Amino acid sequence: MPVKSEIDVFVINKVKEKRIANGWSQFYLADELGMSAGFVGQAENPKSPTKYNLQHINKLARIFKCSLYD
């Protein structure tokens, strides 16, 4: 059984693409989210159960200045 669902992986990959496109480190994005320094790294690690929740996704849309659907 996978640790993260297909939709979790899709969201994480989209966030990673946007993070890299902005030239941001994992640490910087975690700080913007108000999360611990390792949170984004754990979310991006396929072996970790850490993933973004709905509150994170809403905040990420504001951080990236995009729609929730982007």
Image (tube, rainbow, N blue to C red):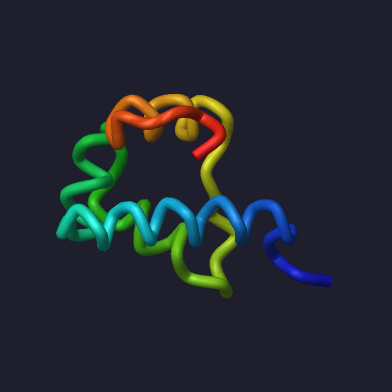
The one nearer the camera, 24 or 39, is 24
In this rendering, would 65 be left or right of 28? right
Q: Is 30 situated above or below 27?
A: above
The residue that appears at 19% across and 53% down in the rendered structure is: 22
Q: Is 67 situated above or below 23?
A: above
The one nearer the camera, 56 or 65, is 65
Across and down, in percent, residue 69 comes to 56, 34
Across and down, in percent, residue 32 comes to 22, 36
Q: Residue furthest right?
A: 1
**Count of marks placed on residues:** 0
* Quadrant (top left, top right, bottom left, bottom right) of the N terminus: bottom right
The residue that appears at 51% across and 29% down in the rendered structure is: 68
Q: Is 25 situated above or below 64?
A: below
The one nearer the camera, 61 or 8, is 61
Across and down, in percent, residue 33 comes to 30, 35
Across and down, in percent, residue 63 comes to 28, 32
The residue that appears at 52% across and 43% down in the rendered structure is: 52
In this rendering, would 8 be left or right of 25? right
In this rendering, would 34 be left or right of 16? left
In this rendering, would 32 be left or right of 1? left
The residue that appears at 76% across and 70% down in the rendered structure is: 2
Q: Is 8 situated above or below 46?
A: above
